[in-house]
């Protein structure tokens, strides 16, 4: 018996305080067996009632590790920050747990954790799986549910903008919003000024890319210069634009010489091109 206790003391000394949640007879039996006591001696001790107020640390060669709610949350947050390259640099990542599992006990050994999002897009996930592996074998699988936010300043309408109205500098302000709840918001006011509203925008709404369009540089009914050919050989003639066209847009134009209607790309004010 003395030799067995001596061998127990020679290992790494990690305290284990027994509490009602942990002091099941099975767990106590495993702890005592780890300390070198024989099966009958261990069974006799494990059968004795455990009193929380008189519990004392047990020294053992290796102790089970416990992962609690705070560490679960930290692991999810660390994982999200490791994926921040998927978001604009202005975004501030937040994770608010809605339901955390109870503490998980891990057996002794080198633990490798794996975090798996519920959605391939990562930041649209409402839950994350935390999988602990020892020597390649899964020993614990936890599911953490919560809300992910990516907060950043985005352009918001200050007043109601009518369809076709140009957006001015005084018509917008920047407001911190969750990027994950928007489609394609504008993070820079300069990218929005001068664009035309494609629909009526109420005051206070986040302006997205689909809500505005670049102003046309070619107007419907305008006579434009039509250039055809390639870099080495070009021909030019005059054409009539059948629709408005922003820079780099493709519109239909009517060749005034041949009267043919063709597709052409708007290359600048009063200029369209056709490449062969």
Image (tube, rainbow, N blue to C red):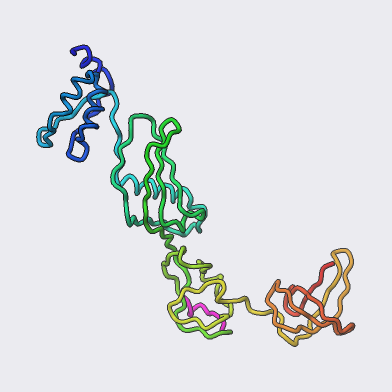
Identify which residue, 74 or 213, lies in the foreground.
74
In the rendered image, the residue lying farthest to the top is: 3
Residue at image coords 51%, 83%? 161
The verdict on residue 128 being magenta is no
Identify which residue, 252 or 218, lies in the foreground.
252
Q: From the viewer's perspective, tell me whether residue 245 is left or right of residue 101.
A: right
Residue at image coords 32%, 51%? 100
Q: How many marks?
A: 0
The quadrant the N terminus occupies is top left
Identify which residue, 263 or 269, lies in the foreground.
263
User: Which residues, given as a range, are shown in magenta?
Assistant: 165-172
Q: Position of residue 157 (x, y in %)?
A: 47, 78
Residue at image coords 75%, 87%? 221
Q: Position of residue 197 (x, y in %)?
A: 56, 80
Q: Position of residue 184 (x, y in %)?
A: 53, 67
Identify which residue, 17 or 233, lies in the foreground.
17
Q: From the viewer's perspective, tell me whether residue 86 is left or right of residue 132.
A: right
- In the rendered image of this protein, does residue 110 appear above or below residue 244? above
Q: From the viewer's perspective, tell me whether residue 148 is left or right of residue 85.
A: left
Query: Quarter of the image holding residue 16?
Result: top left
- In the rendered image of this protein, does residue 191 appear above or below residue 165? above
Q: From the viewer's perspective, tell me whether residue 146 is left or right of residue 188.
A: left
The quadrant the C terminus occupies is bottom right
Q: Position of residue 163 (x, y in %)?
A: 56, 84
């Amino acid at each position: 018996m003395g030799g067995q206790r001596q061998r127990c003391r020679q290992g790494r000394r990690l305290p284990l305080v027994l509490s009602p949640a942990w002091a099941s007879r099975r767990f106590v039996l495993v702890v005592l067996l780890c300390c070198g006591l024989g099966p009958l001696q261990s069974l006799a001790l494990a059968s004795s009632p455990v009193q929380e107020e008189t519990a004392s640390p047990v020294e053992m060669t290796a102790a089970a590790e416990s992962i609690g709610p705070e560490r679960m949350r930290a692991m999810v947050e660390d994982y999200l920050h490791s994926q921040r390259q998927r978001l604009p640099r202005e975004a501030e990542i937040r994770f608010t747990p809605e339901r955390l599992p109870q503490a998980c006990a891990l057996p002794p050994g080198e633990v490798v954790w794996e975090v798996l999002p519920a959605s391939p897009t990562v930041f649209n996930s409402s839950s994350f799986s935390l999988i602990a592996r020892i020597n390649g074998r899964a020993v614990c699988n936890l599911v953490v549910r919560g809300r992910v936010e990516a907060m950043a300043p985005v352009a918001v309408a200050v007043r109601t903008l009518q369809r076709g109205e140009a957006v001015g500098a005084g018509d917008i302000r920047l407001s911190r919003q969750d990027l994950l709840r928007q489609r394609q918001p504008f993070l820079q006011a300069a990218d929005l000024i001068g664009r035309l509203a494609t629909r009526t925008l109420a005051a206070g709404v986040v302006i997205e890319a689909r809500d505005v369009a670049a102003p046309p540089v070619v107007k419907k009914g305008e006579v434009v210069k039509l250039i055809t050919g390639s870099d080495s050989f070009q021909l030019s003639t005059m054409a009539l634009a059948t629709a408005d066209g922003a820079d780099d847009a493709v519109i239909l134009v009517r060749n005034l010489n041949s009267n043919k209607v063709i597709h052409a790309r708007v290359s600048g004010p009063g200029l369209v091109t056709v490449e062969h």
